[in-house]
Image (spheres, rainbow, N blue to C red):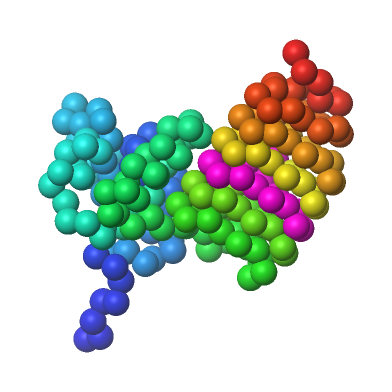
């Protein structure tokens, strides 16, 4: 029989709903022979569905060789980015995961540790930073610049030539008009329609989206 060319193991950091979604996606990608979780609720939490939770993050780092592949699947943007940077410094290897049924242009760029889920779209010329999430059925139009640890929520639509600053959140079902600039640490509420620029740290919501 032919040898199994898959990488031995992927470690998913965070065993919540997003973590399970990412593990499911990783299984569909098929690059890894096994998937395990690390989560700071261990040992009270020692499994999630059929996947084992093997350690806390600190315990995993202390007991593992450098060079192991991992992905951080924690929804809170700053926490996700901080874990990515911590594990990079420790010598672990981050992976990016794109669902087989996502549309990701061969002329777009994907930062390390980023995740693109099922039926999402990332168009030509767009650039995702590190630890980004483009959630299910979300769309990122052409020539967008998406900063580190941005989360584009399920069904959100970003038109072409938009920039989104790091650690910002585009809520479920939101729409962003072309050529908009969204600052760092901004939040676009669920279902909002953004037709003008959004400043750093702002929360905007409604149709059209306004602060408050």
Is residue 79 shown left or right of residue 166? left
Taking 89 as reference, is 18 left or right?
Answer: right
Residue at figure coordinates x 25%, y 38% from the top left: 57
- Please provide percent x and percent y for residue 119: 62, 54
145 relative to 29, above or below: above
Main SS of residues in magenta: loop
- Can you say whether 103 is above or below 157 in the image? below
- Quarter-wise, where is residue 42 in the image? top left
Q: Is residue 144 magenta?
A: yes
Query: What range of the chain is rendered magenta?
Result: 136-156
Q: Residue at x 34, y 42 (%)?
A: 86
Whether residue 63 is situated above or below residue 47 in the rendered picture: below
Q: Could you tell me residue 58's position as x and y percent?
A: 21, 37
Quadrant for the C terminus in the image: top right
Where residue 8 appears, as percent x and y from the top left, is 24, 65
Most distant residue in the bottom direction: 1
Q: Quadrant of residue 184?
A: top right
40 versus 121 height, above or below: above
User: Would residue 8 be counted in the magenta stretch?
Assistant: no
Question: Is residue 163 visible from the viewing direction of this image?
Answer: yes
User: What is the count of numbered marks?
Assistant: 0
- As drawn, the residue found furthest toward the left would be 63
Location of residue 18 by image quarter: top left
Residue 18 visible? The answer is: no
Q: Would you say 115 lies left or right of 55 here?
A: right
Q: Quadrant of the N terminus?
A: bottom left
What is the x, y in percent for residue 38?
Answer: 26, 41
Q: Residue at x 33, y 57 (%)?
A: 93
Residue drawn where x is 69% and y is 50% of the image: 145
């Amino acid at each position: 029989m032919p040898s199994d060319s898959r990488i031995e193991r992927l470690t998913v950091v965070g065993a919540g709903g997003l973590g399970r979604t990412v593990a499911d996606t990783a299984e569909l990608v098929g690059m890894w022979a096994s998937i395990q979780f690390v989560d700071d609720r261990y040992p009270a939490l020692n499994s999630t569905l059929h996947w084992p939770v093997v350690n806390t993050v600190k315990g995993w780092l202390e007991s593992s060789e450098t060079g192991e592949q991992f992905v951080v699947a924690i929804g809170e943007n700053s926490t996700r980015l901080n874990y990515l940077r911590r594990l990079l410094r420790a010598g672990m290897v981050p992976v990016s995961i794109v669902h087989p049924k996502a549309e990701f242009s061969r002329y777009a760029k994907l930062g390390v540790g980023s995740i693109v889920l099922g039926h999402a779209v990332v168009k030509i010329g767009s650039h995702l930073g590190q630890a980004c999430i483009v959630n299910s059925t979300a769309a990122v139009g052409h020539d967008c610049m998406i900063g580190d640890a941005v989360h584009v929520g399920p069904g959100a639509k970003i038109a072409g030539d938009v920039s989104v600053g790091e650690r910002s959140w585009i809520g479920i079902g939101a729409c962003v008009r072309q050529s908009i600039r969204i600052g760092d640490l901004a939040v676009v509420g669920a279902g909002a329609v953004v037709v003008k620029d959004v400043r750093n740290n702002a929360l905007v919501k409604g149709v059209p989206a306004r602060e408050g």
